Amino acid sequence: MSALPSAWAWLTSAAHWSGSDGIWHRLGEHLFLTAVCLSLSCAIALPVALGLGHLGKGGALAVNISNAGRAVPTFAVLVLLLLTPVGGYGQWPTIIALVLFAIPPLLTNAYIGMRGVDPDVVRAARGMGMTGGQLLRRVEAPLALPMILTGVRIAAVQLVATATLAALAGGGGLGRIITAGFNLASTPQVLAGALLVAVFALLVEGVFELVRRLSPSYGRDGSG
């Protein structure tokens, strides 16, 4: 039996969907890990990007520094964290590594979106007496929303794919299906795990693209 039919047979087996090692459980772990890392990354990157974009100062340096960090492989960061006193097997080393991995696209796209707001609109809002905070909340951030959501979508999809590394640190997620397949020398299981990750990533991208298209600011800057 060739690889794809064997992987399909593995996926369609009811026994592989239930239990603590089943697909549903591993998918839930993967979704939780992705959501936690994405939330933490947004909480760190977006306020910085919005603030710097509003001020128009220091943003280029912050973006360049964050993008330079992307040159360091996430796996290398994970290994280094495992060797530190705060490391050890479990979720936290993976969460830290994935958060660092997700910050650059969030920071870059949000900052570009803020700086791409029409200066005439900003001047008009200031002429109406808006304060800096009001300008940021009511004008700049809504107009930058398509680019912000693009960054969130990119980060989310990358996190779904990269969260498989959690299995190497003793964490959960779909990566455990792949690593278990390697341990068992089961090519169908390895391929099935990879297909699950790929489909999950495509679904996440589709959801975020739908949200972006339904956002009130979609198309105001000519995107889409």
Image (cartoon, helix red, strand yellow):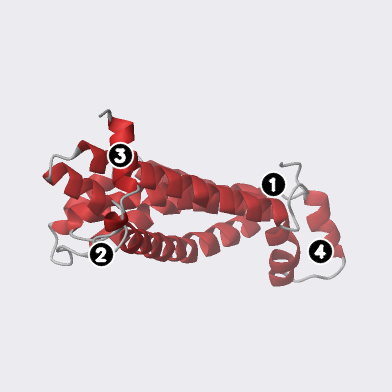
Mark 2 Cα within 10 Å, few/some/many (few <14, many 20+)? Answer: some
Residue labelled with disc 3: 7
Residue labelled with disc 1: 116
**Secondary-structure class at tag 2:** helix
Label count reads 4
Q: Amino acid at mark 2?
A: Gln
**Secondary-structure class at tag 3:** helix
**4 and 1 marks in contact (CB < 8 Å):** no
Residue labelled with disc 2: 91
Marker disc for residue 126: 4
Q: Amino acid at mark 4?
A: Arg
Name the residue located 16 percent from the left edge and 62 percent from the top edge: 89
Name the residue located 44 percent from the left edge and 45 percent from the top edge: 199
Name the residue located 25 percent from the left edge and 64 percent from the top edge: 91
**Real-space Cα distance between discs 2 and 3?**
28 Å
Q: Amino acid at mark 1?
A: Gly
| Residue 110 visible in the snapshot | no
Q: Position of residue 29 (x, y in %)?
A: 33, 63
Disc 1 versus disc 3: nearer the observer:
3
**Real-space Cα distance between discs 2 and 4?**
46 Å
**Real-space Cα distance between discs 4 and 3?**
60 Å
| Quadrant in which the N terminus is drawn | top left
Question: From the viewer's perspective, is 29 left or right of 150?
Answer: left
Q: Sequence-wise, which precedes: disc 2 or disc 3?
A: 3
Taking depth in this image into account, of 40 and 195 the one nearest to the observer is: 195
| Quadrant in which the C terminus is drawn | top right
**Real-space Cα distance between discs 1 and 3?**
46 Å
